[in-house]
Amino acid sequence: MATVSAKIYSHHSRIDGTFNVKICVYHKKERKFFDTTHYLSQKQLTADFTIKDKFILKVIDDELLEHRSTISNLGIKLDSLSCEALRDYLSKKGKNIDFIAFSREHIAVLRSEKRNGSANNFRTVVNSLCDYFRRTSVPIEEINSNMLFSYEKWLKAPRSMVRINQLGKEVMSTQNGLKKGGLYNHLRDLRTLFNEAKRTYNNIDFGLILIKHYPFDTYKLGSSPKTQKRCHTIEQVRAIKTCKPKPGSRAELARDFYMLSFYSCGANACDFYNFLDLLKPKSKRWDYNRSKTSGQREDNAFFSVRILPEARKIINKYIGVLKVRYCAEDAFNTALSMGFRDLNKILGFKEITMYWARHSFANIARNKCGISKDDIGEALNHVNEEHKTTDIYLDRDWSIVDKVQEQVCLALQGKLSLVKSLETGYFEDGNYFEEINIERDTTVSEEYSNQKHKQFDEFVNYLLSIGYEKQRDNNSFGHLKLTKKIDEFQICSIAVYPGGELQMIGVPLLCSTESPKIPVESRSLFDTKVIKPNLSEFQIVERVMTRSQISYSPITSSRI
């Protein structure tokens, strides 16, 4: 049978000379203690530290009687409880639960776990509740469904707030009402805090319920609103890059870190503040654990991104400076927020934030560079739930991230990024690539690339006009094969490549080439050469080798 008793210890004296009365819980040969609200002076105690004040003694006896009654009412559940669990239950039962105090304790725990993002969101909720109730103590019973309906209306309306600034002074500011997305996120965070309070104070397994109501059964949040697209066009990103705000201003800070995020595959401000100073001026890669998800993933959200020359200039500018200028991450975020507002006024954009840099990187990678969603997810350090088991067997290939990063930055520079992906192999600009490889033409301009495509069309149109036919199994992303029957025993096959190269398969050619590299699928027992002629030169070679006598007249068709 569990027992409870009051204890006072001489070595637990406070600075003012008083001693706290503690409740000792004895259960299963263990003792656990919890504090009461009673503090006694030396005059109220005997020499052996027992209570001699009759009034206090009566109050303590009544509390002990209530605890014993609670233990008796547990019945057979008592055997399932450890001494610590029983202590926690007795200490919380009958106690008014201050939701604000609990929330602040929970926020402190999150900060100790370095989950500052969640802690900041919950702090916003707590401050808002204090503004709404106009006091800093709120019993959890007051967080009910009626309150939530009223609170929602209050959040939608403009309101004034008093906050303590970095100098410790109270500052009043006015804030606009929340919109759908912000309102949903705010009330979702409030629900998370309430659920955490229930998890802390209730023990469902043993039927020990201290918080009996749940306001979110009546007040429904519904589904989250569709996230608004938060991405800039490639022209807008270029405008941000070339913008020249006042040197040393917050707008310059915002521009620099927007572009640094863009160059670094969408890294966020928190990671820049925490990890930027760990880099060396000549570091080639930036290895870090993404703060937002590091505590939620088995790999601690480790990420490695190459430092591009454009990014290095910005990094060297702020290494050793950021934490000197801003004593805390919150101060850095505030400066960025104000800087983005100033930058937005200069450029006249709808909005500019670090999230917009991350979303813009992903959007350009997909829609301008044609990169697969899986590779973009790798570059954003996302976890693919469908491939989670497979990922256990695989090492991270950072070259995939490097390719996405390079493609996007080349697109930003105005260079066309040619991506060809074939299962067997392909040939481009004299280089051969087997299996699934990606070749990026980093030197040609869009104008020159269009000229190459025009040459491709000319060759194909000419071959079609003299009796060649396209093969049905052609890969539309690589070279195009066309065949023509010469006589009863010979068939000529010609492959046309995106760069204007030609390969004649199955007949001997007497022309030479500097780089006779042949795709795997096109190798044959016959002599095969790769040539890069102009149209008139090719007409002569083709007629000589195949005895074609059909005259050629240009035809107009869409690009194959």
Image: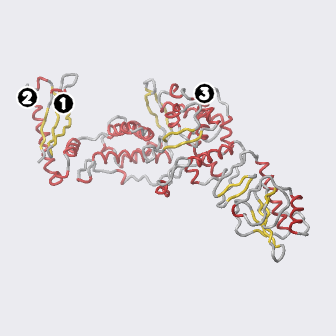
Looking at the rendered structure, the secondary structure element under dot 1 is strand
Which residue is rendered at x = 59% and y = 42% of the image?
Answer: 357
Q: Quadrant of residue 150?
A: top left
Amino acid under disc 3: Ser
Amino acid under disc 1: Asn
Residue 89's label in the rendered image is none
Looking at the rendered structure, the secondary structure element under dot 2 is loop
Residue 52's label in the rendered image is 2
Residue 20's label in the rendered image is 1
Task: Report whether 156 appears left or right of 228.
Answer: left
Q: Nearer the viewer, residue 372 or 246?
A: 372
Amino acid under disc 2: Lys
Q: Earlier in the sequence, mark 3 or mark 1?
A: 1
Q: Earlier in the sequence, mark 2 or mark 3?
A: 2
Residue 249's label in the rendered image is 3
Q: Eyeballing the image, is 17 above or below 201?
A: above
Residue 246's x, y, as percent? 64, 27
Q: Quadrant of the C terminus?
A: bottom right
Specify whether residue 99 is in view.
yes
Residue 284's x, y, as percent? 59, 37
